Structures are given as structure tokens and as C-alpha cells.
Image (tube, grey):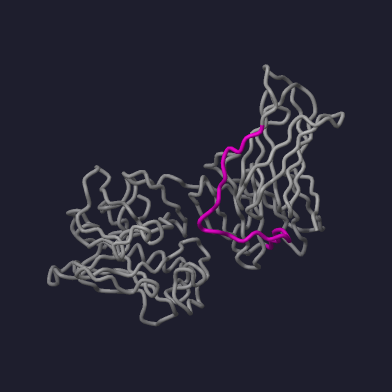
């Protein structure tokens, strides 16, 4: 059954006496090209903002209802052209019709769109009020726009882009509910690059998303803030250092480059450090193989992440990608609450690929600081099941493992 919805980015609140309201504001955005997904980790509800950079939540036993199938038209009123952003729930062919205020059709068109955030541009043929109807077999969306002035346009509608997020997140049709003390995860999506912040707000607050993790090959990495640290939320995949020189000692799992976009590359410890000495400082100060503005974490920096997530056992599940798309079963403890999205890239030793799907191995900048053991360095390891023995590893430096960098 097709349900017709009228869209505007308006928050509707049920108000209860003595409830506490807080406003969350997000910076570092490109409004119109970015959406913000807000998930309540504590109770499992969520909602998405498109074209907005703030939301007001009322704490208590009331529900904060947000038009969850959000759309945005901007600017409105407009001159010449207006942009329309909306979330499509399915890949489909959408029939689009535009009528004027007396009901005359000025444009009819079919456009194939994907599940995700879609952006359209409408050019008006003349000034006046227009009604834009976009529908498929399962969805229908309607907009009203006002054109104040045109410069000899003909009616035209084009698809500008589609943001189909690789790391999917769930959309709740019930809206977001919130009580002071709940942990929220905010995911900003800018052209499929995610910036993730987790927090338990107790008062109005402003957050700033971060999108500056870009390597020499122009790979842009999603990021996540945990405690006071910003981490890469994907494995490094650059084959070049930030000065453009080639990384000697980096590999693609099984020599299959289709794995690179998923699991990143695997690096020997020497490749990671790029001539730097081992250290356990916080911050490590080792730029190494990381993008400009980022560094190789020391063991103590990994420990800071561990402690921010409640210790080694809670950390294990909170940072792993959920499900068995990439992890072998059972992976039953995986929650990925902070968007760290650990993937089981395995390792390479003497040309042999091992443990993909089962384990994730990450180097850090710390080796035997006494200088007695020059063959090994430490790292963190995660398994496809909870284990009391995970986390610390002491591997040969010639083994190739995954890398996550930390913001300077």
C-alpha cells in the first residue's frame, strides 16, 4: 500500500511538565550534501537529519517525534533553481511530475535512484508556485516550492548525486527517544565518508565532525571520536607515504585488490614506522605511514581507547563490525557502538595470507624499548569470538598487519 507523506524538516515534540530539553548542534557540515544519523545506543531508537544541523531533545518519558523519512528543499523560495534532498528506502525507478498552481503539468520524468540520500535539482520555467511529486511502487513524496524569478529557463529536473553509505546504519520509523544519561552516537555522512562521535549529553552541546583524514593517494577515511581521541574508522590502504614516496613492505591480502577497499593494506612494522624509533609515549609522535596530521598510535594510546570503552572485554565488542558479512561466525559479541568498525584483515607472513575473517591485527609504535628484542613489536588483536587472550600481541616485525592512525 502506498502512503503519501508531505515533507518538511520540522520537529514535533510531546511536552511533559518538568522534562528537560537539550539542543544538540553539529558543526563541520556541508548542509544539503550531508546527513546526520543519531542513534540512541541505550534504547535502540534513531532518527536522521538532512539539511539541518541541530535537534532539540526532551528528556523524560515523552517521545521526540521527527519526520523520519525526512526531506529538504532549499532554498525556498528560490531564483531559477531549487535543490531537493530526500531519503529513498529502496533502489527503484521514480516517476516525477511537476505541476503549477492551476494544476497544469510542466514536467514529467522517470529517474532511477538508489537506496540512500538523493539530491535533485529543479529549474523552473517561470515564476510561481510548483508542486513536485516523486513516486515509485512503494514510496511517494510531495513538495511545494516557490520560484520568485527566472532567467529564461525551460523546466528541467536532474539527479545531482546519491549517497549510498558503505557502512549502513539502521533507520528507525518510530523516531528518537531520549533520557538524560543515554549514550548517543552521531554519524555525519559527507559523500560516503563518515565522521562519528559518541557521547552521553546532559545539557545542550555543540559537536564538530572531522573529515581531514586524507592520504597522499587522496583516499578519504571515515573517523570516529572516542573519549578525547580521534581515530581512523577504516584500515589504512595507502601504498605511499605522505611525501609521495612508495611504501616498501605493504601488501594486499591474497594479492587480491578487491580486498583493499574493505580490509585496507597490510604493513610490516618497518613500513609503518618509516625509520622512526619505537616509543610508548602518548602521543607517540610517530608520523610513519599515516596521513598528514595523523600518527601511529603507541601501545598506551591503544590502552586509552580501551579504558574509554570500559576495559578490554567490553572494548572487544564495542569496536567490531556487526554481523558475519566479513567476520566468520559467531562474532556474537560485536556491537560497533562507536563506529570503529574493526574488520578481520588477518595478516601476511613470508608471502602467506592467514586469518582473514577470523582475526584483526593492528600494529602500534611500541617495540621492546630496552633494545633486547629487536625482532618483535607489540600490537592489538581482535577475534571473531570473545576471548580472555585477545588484545595484546607480540609479533615479528616482518609480519604484515593492519594499521589505524590517530589524530595529532
Q: Which residues are magenta?
A: 157-179
Q: Is residue 314 above or below residue 187?
A: below
Q: Residue at x 62, y 35 (%)?
A: 158
Q: Could you tell me which quadrant the N terminus lies in?
A: bottom right
Horizontal side of residue 59 vs 348, given as left or right: right
Q: Residue furthest bottom?
A: 388
Q: Is residue 167 magenta?
A: yes
- Residue 106 image offset from top left, x and y in percent: 77, 29
**Is residue 82 at all visible to an observer of this figure?**
no
Q: Closer to the camera, 29 or 126?
A: 126
Please check the rendered image and state whether residue 203 is part of the magenta-colored stretch, yes or no. no
Quadrant position of residue 159: top right
Q: Nearer the viewer, residue 86 or 272?
A: 86
Residue at the limit of the structure toward the right, as seen here:
102
Residue 353 drawn at (x, y percent): 28, 70
Q: Is residue 30 above or below residue 283?
A: above
Q: Residue at x 36, y 74 (%)?
A: 391
Q: Position of residue 405 (x, y in %)?
A: 35, 56
Expressed as whole percent of the image width and height from the top left, the position of residue 222 reads 45, 52
Amino acid at each position: 500500500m502506498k502512503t503519501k507523506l508531505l515533507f518538511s524538516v520540522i520537529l514535533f515534540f510531546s511536552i511533559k511538565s518538568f522534562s528537560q530539553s537539550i539542543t544538540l548542534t553539529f558543526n563541520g557540515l556541508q548542509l544539503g550534501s550531508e546527513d546526520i544519523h543519531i542513534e540512541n545506543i541505550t534504547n535502540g531508537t534513531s532518527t536522521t537529519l538532512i539539511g539541518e544541523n541541530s535537534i532539540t531533545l526532551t528528556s523524560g518519558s515523552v517521545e521526540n517525534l521527527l519526520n523520519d523519512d525526512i526531506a529538504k528543499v532549499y532554498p525556498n523560495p528560490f531564483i531559477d533553481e531549487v535543490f531537493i534532498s530526500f531519503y529513498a528506502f529502496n533502489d527503484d525507478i521514480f516517476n516525477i511530475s511537476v505541476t503549477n498552481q492551476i494544476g497544469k503539468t510542466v514536467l514529467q520524468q522517470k529517474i532511477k535512484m538508489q537506496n540512500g540520500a538523493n539530491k535533485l535539482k529543479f529549474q523552473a520555467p517561470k515564476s510561481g508556485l510548483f508542486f513536485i511529486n516523486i513516486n515509485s511502487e512503494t514510496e511517494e513524496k510531495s513538495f511545494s516550492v516557490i520560484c520568485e524569478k527566472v532567467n529564461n529557463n525551460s523546466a528541467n529536473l536532474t539527479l545531482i548525486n546519491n549517497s549510498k553509505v558503505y557502512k549502513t546504519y539502521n533507520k528507525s520509523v518510530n523516531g528518537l527517544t531520549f533520557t538524560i544519561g543515554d549514550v548517543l552516537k552521531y554519524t555525519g555522512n559527507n559523500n560516503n565518508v563518515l565522521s562519528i562521535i559518541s557521547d552521553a549529553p546532559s545539557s545542550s552541546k555543540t559537536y564538530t565532525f572531522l573529515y581531514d583524514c586524507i592520504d597522499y593517494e587522496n583516499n578519504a577515511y571515515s573517523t570516529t571520536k572516542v573519549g578525547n581521541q580521534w581515530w581512523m574508522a577504516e584500515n589504512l590502504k595507502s601504498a605511499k607515504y605522505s611525501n609521495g614516496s612508495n611504501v616498501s613492505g605493504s601488501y594486499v591480502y591474497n594479492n587480491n585488490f578487491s580486498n583493499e577497499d574493505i580490509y585496507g593494506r597490510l604493513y610490516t612494522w618497518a613500513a609503518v614506522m618509516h625509520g622512526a624509533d619505537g616509543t610508548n609515549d602518548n602521543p607517540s609522535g610517530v608520523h610513519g605511514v599515516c596521513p598528514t596530521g595523523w600518527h601511529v598510535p603507541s601501545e598506551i594510546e591503544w590502552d586509552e581507547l580501551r579504558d574509554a570503552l570500559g576495559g578490554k572485554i567490553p572494548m572487544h565488542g564495542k569496536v567490531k563490525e556487526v554481523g558475519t558479512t566479513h567476520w566468520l561466525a559467531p562474532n556474537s559479541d560485536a556491537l560497533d557502538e562507536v563506529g570503529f568498525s574493526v574488520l578481520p584483515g588477518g595478516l601476511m607472513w613470508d608471502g602467506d595470507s592467514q586469518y582473514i575473517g577470523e582475526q584483526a591485527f593492528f600494529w602500534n609504535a611500541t617495540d621492546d624499548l630496552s633494545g633486547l628484542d629487536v625482532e618483535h613489536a607489540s600490537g592489538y588483536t581482535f577475534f571473531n569470538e570473545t576471548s580472555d587472550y585477545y588484545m595484546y600481541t607480540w609479533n615479528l616485525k616482518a609480519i604484515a598487519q593492519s594499521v589505524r592512525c590517530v589524530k595529532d
